[in-house]
Image (tube, helix red, strand yellow):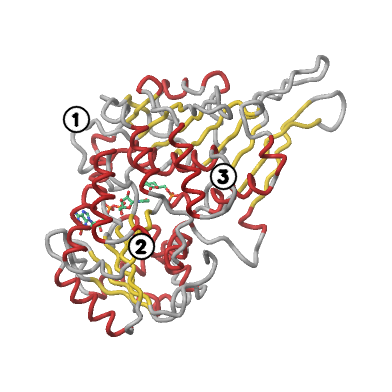
Amino acid sequence: MASDTPADGRPLLLVLFGSTGDLAKRKLYPALFQLHARGLTSKEYAVIGSGRHSPGTDDDFREIVSDAVKGAHGGEAPAGLDEFTARFRFQSSSAEDGEDLARVVRETREGLGADTRTLLYLSVPPASMSGMLGMIGSTGLSDDAVLVMEKPFGEDVASACALNKRLHEIVPEERVFRVDHFLGKEAVRNLLALRLANGWLESVWNREHLAYVQIDVPEEIDIEGRASFMESTGTFRDMIPTHLGQVLGIVALDLPERYGADELREARTALFRKLRPFSPDETVFGQYEGYREEEGVAADSTAETFVALRAWIDDPRWEGVPFLLRTGKAMGVSRQQVTIGLREASRVPGADYAACDRPSEWVFDLTDPPRFGVEAYGKRPGTGFRLVRAPLMLDEGTAFPDDPPLTAYARVFLDALAGDPTWFTGAEEIERLWEVCADVQGEGGVPLPYARGSFGPTAALELAGKRGWRVPEK
Ligand SMILES: NC(=O)C1=CN([C@@H]2O[C@H](COP(=O)(O)OP(=O)(O)OC[C@H]3O[C@@H](n4cnc5c(N)ncnc54)[C@H](OP(=O)(O)O)[C@@H]3O)[C@@H](O)[C@H]2O)C=CC1
Ligand SMILES: O=C1O[C@H](COP(=O)(O)O)[C@@H](O)[C@H](O)[C@H]1O
């Protein structure tokens, strides 16, 4: 396993399907540039962007890439940008027609050298994955290539199983990397590291000491032009069986005896088998006010832009501990936070607990750069014996200035280049997660409206019970 090493000396050809999409522009190009700037890619490499609609000439495409990288650098061109974009070109393709692309790939590989490694990255909507795989197989594009596939993997149990079957017809599992970029986040990996490295933590990581777990990913952004994605996929499928489900897996799994890809996957799969199927009675779908007026959205759309749910794990470690999951667009704040609430100590008469409105909580910020905090209470200096919040915070972004963290997508690329599957998802766990979701999918009916800038419908606030959701700070 060589997760932290740059790609070996072999030349690299990256073919990016969905290269004009939101993900490519906001995350993939900046991430690739981060690796390029740090010398973490192969020395010799080329990128072919693809999609059904050409953005124009290769130079037009390079401008898209260039703008995306500048966008991630405060609008300025970082050093080396031209050298980076010069490696890009565009070739159209679709599920029906991939011959021109296959020819360009062959020519580019010949130019780079016989030992060129080819990485096919599918950043296309879930409904188009299967057709694209058919084309990739029939044109021979998949021969010797590594396939990297975006989430959500399928749209339900049946389509995920069918997609896995189709995938294995064209490439063996060793060459498949199913991305869930939350598993690329330093903070998510750190969650596992903290559990592995701190015996005291693991000894209290259970129902005796923990009262609840909240996995909260509110987003201030609305759909920002991604109408067709939201209309066809919705927030539930976009986020729950994927990112929030995977984070739940890392929080709740039984620690494996070895740190390795198979062991971690098995531990998550075992946990997901114990995850009780989500119940429509404990799930709230919402849609922000004004969503139906967005361009490309149906006037009577029932797509949910928000979901909150309470989940349970049927296992002695977690019996009675609610796992609260929430995410949505156009909400009051942007955060990616795991909050673990500790059981409250009994209160000692005479001390002033007035400021202790919440129990002690461990708070993990999953954003780049990551932060980990303990919300504890201590004595307020001065007269009396008044207890106050005494938060302790480790900011990993500034803690290691010589080695700043890579973005989640830079890690995803780096791991795929190094052939390290440890932080990618497996077929079985994905299929199980869709099973857990089955009773809720399609049961949402008309989602409840919520005001832009709020924290979702009232019914969702009530799911969290008397402690409520930890309100993420601005
Ligand atoms: N945006 C984000 O923040 C994130 C997105 N993702 C995942 O990345 C994938 C892409 O999302 P995103 O970029 O937002 O989507 P967009 O709708 O913004 O872009 C989709 C891209 O795929 C191409 N595409 C669309 N339909 C087809 C088709 N039928 N066949 C081939 N190509 C097609 C589009 O080009 P053209 O129409 O020219 O073919 C476009 O380049 C999705 O699976 C999503 O879940 C994952 C993490 C974050
Ligand atoms: O996969 C997705 O994730 C993003 C949020 O992740 P981030 O860490 O990249 O901000 C979400 O906005 C998007 O809708 C979803 O498709």
Task: Say what secondary structure mark 1 lies in.
Answer: loop
Q: Residue at x 44, y 40 (%)?
A: 244
Estimate the x, y position of residue 416 in percent, counting from the top left: 42, 63
Estimate the x, y position of residue 214 in percent, counting from the top left: 53, 33
Q: From mark 3 to mark 2, how far is it between C-alphas?
A: 32 Å
Task: State the residue in front, 155 or 263.
Answer: 263
Q: Which mark is residue 365?
A: 3
User: Which numbered disc, 2 or 1, marks the residue that appears first in the sequence?
Assistant: 2
Estimate the x, y position of residue 381 in percent, counting from the top left: 84, 33
Question: Closer to us: mark 3 or mark 2?
Answer: 2
Q: Residue at x 49, y 40 (%)?
A: 249
From this view, report whether residue 239 is shown above or below residue 467: below
Q: Which mark is residue 272?
A: none
| Mark 1: amino acid | Asp
Residue 106 placement: quadrant? bottom left
Residue 154 placement: quadrant? top left
Q: Residue at x 70, y 45 (%)?
A: 198
Task: Judge the density around disc 2: few (<14), some (14-19), many (≥20) Cα neighbours within 10 Å.
Answer: some
Q: From mark 3 to mark 1, how far is it between C-alphas?
A: 36 Å
Q: Residue at x 50, y 43 (%)?
A: 267
Question: Closer to us: mark 2 or mark 1?
Answer: 2
Task: Say what secondary structure mark 2 lies in.
Answer: helix
User: Which numbered disc, 3 or 1, marks the residue that appears first in the sequence?
Assistant: 1
Task: State the residue in front, 309 or 437.
Answer: 437
Task: State the residue in front, 446 or 274.
Answer: 274
Residue 123 placement: quadrant? bottom left
| Mark 3: amino acid | Asp
Disc 3 under 8 Å from ligand 2? The reply is no
Estimate the x, y position of residue 16 in percent, counting from the top left: 30, 65
Quarter of the picture holding the C terminus: top right
Q: Which mark is residue 175?
A: 2
Residue beneath label 1, please?
A: 300
